[in-house]
Amino acid sequence: MNEQKISAVHTPCKKCVFAEYTDKTQTDCHLDYINKYIKNDVKIFEAYDEEKEFFIIDGKKCIGYRENRWFEKRNLGDVSIQDKIANYKASNYAHYVAVINLKDLDLKQLEKICHNIKACQIKPQKIVLIRHLDENKGFHYKDIENIFNAMDIDYPWRIQTMLDEELPYEYILYDIIKNNKSCRFLLSIAEDSDILDKLVCDTNKRVYEELDNFCACGNSSKKIVFYSSTVYRYAFETGKDILNDTELYTVV
């Protein structure tokens, strides 16, 4: 291997099932991720050992990296590469928690938000409703349950009632992220809007098709925001203000 300094975080393609080889030399990626990383100015190193010549993606944990044992656990170890690609794409998309802040909403607005969530092509893994005692006296559990039942929403949801109204909303989101580590993203909703499906789909395309990064994006009022959970957690712990930093927050 050439004397080049590789970052502590990197991905060697050698054992990935999507690495495309001619004899013992990797020539491409079945997901076309090598070309996409290059387009995004990610360094790609050429390496070799006693077995193969392969690429190393520098500074990234490649989201497409899969060894065959990942497919074997799903009884797909012997299927064609085309079937593995299809299986990967079917399971590799934005997993997110949708958090609905009921503070300035009423039941009619909640009903519209639930309708827009259900219309999203990529559904949330879970919905958390933040109910405030002072402002949300009209949000009785049965009323909320009736809305979800009428919408036939069958993914998990729960109500979190805030007893301490002095607790900042940012801390609530941080706590939800910490308790939902299987979700890479969080969608915060504080007003009814038709932007939800576009916001989630555009961000999903940006991350999983274009292999680009983002911190947070949403509407101009900043009441509908899609966060990267990892970035949000780091920003919260280091005191960074994502919503008021033009380099971190993108208006869609």
Image: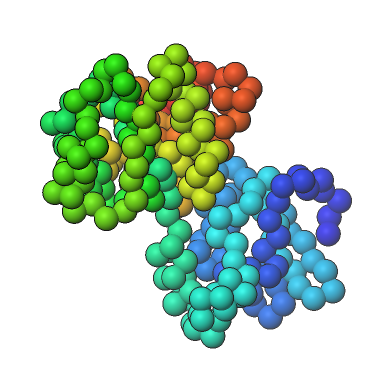
Quadrant assignment, res 70:
bottom right
Quadrant assignment, res 252:
top left
Residue at image position (40%, 65%) is 90
Q: Nearer the viewer, residue 214 or 176?
A: 176
Which x, y percent locates residue 235?
57, 26
Residue at image position (26%, 18%) is 135
Residue at image position (45%, 59%) is 92
Q: Is residue 136 above or below residue 166?
A: below
Q: Is residue 142 above or below residue 78?
A: above
Q: Is residue 236 visible?
A: yes
Does residue 135 appear to the left or right of 96 in the view shown? left
Q: Extreme top residue here?
A: 166
Which x, y percent locates residue 8?
77, 46
Which x, y percent locates residue 200?
34, 43
Q: Nearer the viewer, residue 166 or 108?
A: 166
Q: Quadrant of the N terminus?
A: bottom right
Q: How is the image coloured?
A: rainbow
Residue at image position (82%, 48%) is 4
Q: Extreme bottom residue here?
A: 78
